[in-house]
Image (cartoon, helix red, strand yellow):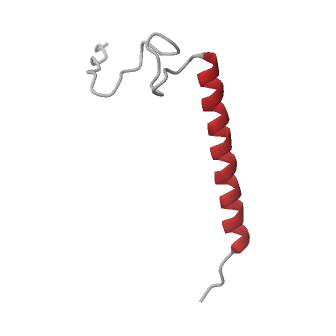
């Protein structure tokens, strides 16, 4: 039976912790700058691409050349 690689497990935990901390800081800065509404949903009309479709929205097919 193979021995467990504790160093790998520790590194993965550290990376997950770091990623979670970065996400938390980003969310905090977004809230501070007013990009998100109070409930956590994105405010309409800001930082959105007109080319991307939202889930459930029909995307028109590309015209044939």
Q: Residue furthest bottom?
A: 1
Residue at the image position 48 percent from the left and 28 percent from the top: 40
Q: Residue at x 42, y 15 (%)?
A: 51
Residue 27: image quadrant is: top right
Total labels drawn? 0
Residue nearest the viewer, comparing 6 with 41:
41
Question: Split into 4 quadrants, where in the image is the N terminus?
Answer: bottom right
Within the image, what quadrant is residue 39 found in?
A: top left
Using the image as rendered, state which of residue 9 and residue 28 is in the foreground. Answer: 28
**Residue in the image at 68% along x and 75% along y:** 5
Taking the image as shown, residue 30 lies to the left or right of residue 14, namely: left
Q: Quadrant of residue 23?
A: top right
Residue at the farthest front position: 38
Describe residue 6's horizontal placement relative to residue 39 as left or right. Answer: right
Where, quadrant-wise, is the C terminus in this rendering? top left
Counting from the top left corner in percent of width and height, residue 44 is at: 43, 13
- Relative to 56, does residue 15 appear above or below in the rendering? below
State whether residue 13 is above or below residue 48.
below
Q: Where is residue 2 drawn, in percent x and y? A: 62, 85
- Image coords of residue 7 (percent x, y): 73, 70
Nearer the observer, 6 or 32: 32
6 is higher (above) or lower (below) than 3: above
Q: Residue furthest top?
A: 45
Q: Is residue 6 left or right of residue 46?
A: right
């Amino acid at each position: 039976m193979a021995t467990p690689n504790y160093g790998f497990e520790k590194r993965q935990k550290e990376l997950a912790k770091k990623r979670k901390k970065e996400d938390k800081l980003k969310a905090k800065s977004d809230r501070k700058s007013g990009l998100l509404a109070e409930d956590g949903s994105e405010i309409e009309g800001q930082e959105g691409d007109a080319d991307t479709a939202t889930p459930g929205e029909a995307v028109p097919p590309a015209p044939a050349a």
